[in-house]
Amino acid sequence: MTRRAVFHLPRPFSLNNKDANLPSGGRVKTAAYRAWIAEAQAMIMAAGPRPRFDRPVMIHLDVGFDGVSPLFDLDNAIKPALDVLVGMRIIPDDRRKFVQRVSAQWCADEGCRATVEEFR
Protein backbone atom coordinates (compact mmCIF):
# COMPACT_ATOMS: atom_id res chain seq x y z
CA MET A 1 0.00 0.00 0.00
CA THR A 2 1.28 3.45 -0.92
CA ARG A 3 1.77 5.86 1.98
CA ARG A 4 -0.02 9.16 1.63
CA ALA A 5 -0.52 12.22 3.84
CA VAL A 6 -2.35 15.52 3.44
CA PHE A 7 -1.21 18.78 5.04
CA HIS A 8 -3.09 22.06 5.20
CA LEU A 9 -1.04 25.22 4.80
CA PRO A 10 -1.96 28.90 4.95
CA ARG A 11 -2.78 31.06 1.95
CA PRO A 12 -0.03 30.67 -0.66
CA PHE A 13 3.08 32.75 -0.29
CA SER A 14 4.78 34.14 -3.39
CA LEU A 15 8.48 33.66 -4.01
CA ASN A 16 8.52 37.28 -5.14
CA ASN A 17 8.21 38.30 -1.47
CA LYS A 18 10.40 35.59 0.05
CA ASP A 19 13.78 37.34 0.31
CA ALA A 20 15.07 40.84 0.84
CA ASN A 21 18.37 42.21 -0.40
CA LEU A 22 20.90 43.29 2.21
CA PRO A 23 23.11 46.35 1.69
CA SER A 24 26.08 43.95 1.88
CA GLY A 25 24.81 42.12 -1.18
CA GLY A 26 23.40 39.09 0.62
CA ARG A 27 19.79 38.01 0.96
CA VAL A 28 17.64 37.29 3.99
CA LYS A 29 14.13 35.88 4.49
CA THR A 30 11.58 38.65 4.88
CA ALA A 31 9.57 39.04 8.08
CA ALA A 32 6.43 38.18 6.09
CA TYR A 33 7.96 34.92 4.86
CA ARG A 34 9.18 33.97 8.34
CA ALA A 35 5.64 34.63 9.65
CA TRP A 36 4.15 32.47 6.86
CA ILE A 37 6.55 29.63 7.73
CA ALA A 38 5.63 29.88 11.43
CA GLU A 39 1.90 29.76 10.60
CA ALA A 40 2.38 26.79 8.25
CA GLN A 41 4.41 24.91 10.87
CA ALA A 42 1.75 25.60 13.52
CA MET A 43 -0.98 24.27 11.22
CA ILE A 44 0.99 21.08 10.58
CA MET A 45 1.75 20.60 14.29
CA ALA A 46 -1.91 21.18 15.25
CA ALA A 47 -2.98 18.37 12.91
CA GLY A 48 -1.28 15.79 15.11
CA PRO A 49 1.53 13.32 14.48
CA ARG A 50 3.09 13.77 11.09
CA PRO A 51 4.56 11.02 8.97
CA ARG A 52 8.09 11.17 7.66
CA PHE A 53 8.79 10.01 4.15
CA ASP A 54 12.27 8.64 3.50
CA ARG A 55 11.54 7.25 0.04
CA PRO A 56 10.92 9.22 -3.17
CA VAL A 57 7.60 11.07 -3.20
CA MET A 58 5.25 12.93 -5.47
CA ILE A 59 3.61 16.07 -4.15
CA HIS A 60 0.39 17.67 -5.32
CA LEU A 61 -0.70 21.15 -4.24
CA ASP A 62 -4.27 22.39 -4.37
CA VAL A 63 -3.74 26.14 -4.12
CA GLY A 64 -6.68 28.28 -3.09
CA PHE A 65 -7.21 31.43 -5.09
CA ASP A 66 -9.64 33.12 -2.66
CA GLY A 67 -7.97 36.29 -1.42
CA VAL A 68 -4.92 35.80 -3.66
CA SER A 69 -3.93 38.47 -6.16
CA PRO A 70 -4.93 37.63 -9.75
CA LEU A 71 -1.29 38.38 -10.65
CA PHE A 72 -0.03 35.53 -8.42
CA ASP A 73 1.68 32.81 -10.46
CA LEU A 74 0.79 29.26 -9.45
CA ASP A 75 4.40 28.09 -9.70
CA ASN A 76 5.40 30.62 -7.01
CA ALA A 77 3.46 28.58 -4.42
CA ILE A 78 5.50 25.42 -4.95
CA LYS A 79 8.87 26.35 -3.43
CA PRO A 80 7.51 27.77 -0.15
CA ALA A 81 5.32 24.68 0.35
CA LEU A 82 8.24 22.32 -0.30
CA ASP A 83 10.46 24.33 2.04
CA VAL A 84 7.94 23.88 4.87
CA LEU A 85 7.68 20.13 4.24
CA VAL A 86 11.47 19.89 4.44
CA GLY A 87 11.66 22.17 7.47
CA MET A 88 9.11 20.01 9.31
CA ARG A 89 11.12 16.91 8.32
CA ILE A 90 8.18 15.37 6.51
CA ILE A 91 10.47 14.91 3.53
CA PRO A 92 14.26 14.86 3.97
CA ASP A 93 15.02 17.23 1.10
CA ASP A 94 13.38 18.64 -2.01
CA ARG A 95 16.08 17.61 -4.46
CA ARG A 96 15.29 15.06 -7.15
CA LYS A 97 16.49 12.10 -5.08
CA PHE A 98 13.39 12.53 -2.91
CA VAL A 99 10.87 14.61 -4.88
CA GLN A 100 10.16 12.84 -8.14
CA ARG A 101 7.07 14.78 -9.20
CA VAL A 102 5.35 18.02 -8.23
CA SER A 103 1.99 19.21 -9.53
CA ALA A 104 -0.18 22.17 -8.62
CA GLN A 105 -3.63 23.39 -9.48
CA TRP A 106 -5.89 26.25 -8.47
CA CYS A 107 -8.94 25.51 -6.35
CA ALA A 108 -11.76 27.65 -4.97
CA ASP A 109 -10.52 27.66 -1.37
CA GLU A 110 -8.35 29.67 0.92
CA GLY A 111 -5.00 28.25 1.86
CA CYS A 112 -3.20 25.35 0.30
CA ARG A 113 -3.48 21.59 0.60
CA ALA A 114 -0.29 19.58 0.09
CA THR A 115 -0.69 15.87 -0.63
CA VAL A 116 2.51 13.84 -0.22
CA GLU A 117 2.52 10.30 -1.58
CA GLU A 118 5.21 7.70 -2.06
CA PHE A 119 6.31 7.72 -5.67
CA ARG A 120 5.33 4.63 -7.58
Image (cartoon, rainbow, N blue to C red):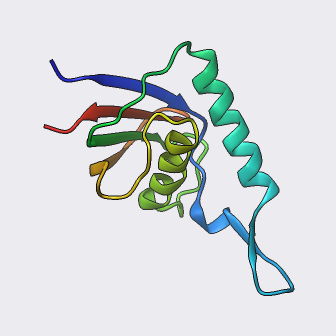
Q: Residue at x 71, y 53 (%)?
A: 33
Q: Residue at x 63, y 35 (%)?
A: 40
Residue 84 as seen in the image, left or right of residue 105: right
The quadrant of the image that shows the N terminus is: top left
The quadrant of the image that shows the C terminus is: top left
Between residues 66 and 21, which one lies in front from this camera angle?
Answer: 21
Q: Position of residue 112 (x, y in %)?
A: 49, 37
Q: Position of residue 12 (x, y in %)?
A: 56, 46
Q: Position of residue 98 (x, y in %)?
A: 31, 48
Residue 120 as seen in the image, left or right of residue 66: left
Compared with residue 44, is residue 31 higher up or lower down, i.e. above or below? below
Furthest residue toward top:
48
Q: Residue at x 28, y 38 (%)?
A: 55
Residue 102 shows in the view: no
Residue 20 shows in the view: yes
Which corner quadrant of the image does residue 108 belong to? top left
Q: Position of residue 28 (x, y in %)?
A: 76, 68
Which corner quadrant of the image does residue 6 belong to? top left
Furthest residue toward right:
23
**Count of marks, rendered view:** 0
Q: Residue at x 82, y 79 (%)?
A: 22
Compared with residue 86, is residue 39 higher up or lower down, i.e. above or below? above
Compared with residue 12, is residue 24 higher up or lower down, i.e. above or below? below
Residue 96 as seen in the image, left or right of residue 7: left
Between residues 107 and 81, which one lies in front from this camera angle?
Answer: 81
Compared with residue 48, is residue 65 higher up or lower down, i.e. above or below? below
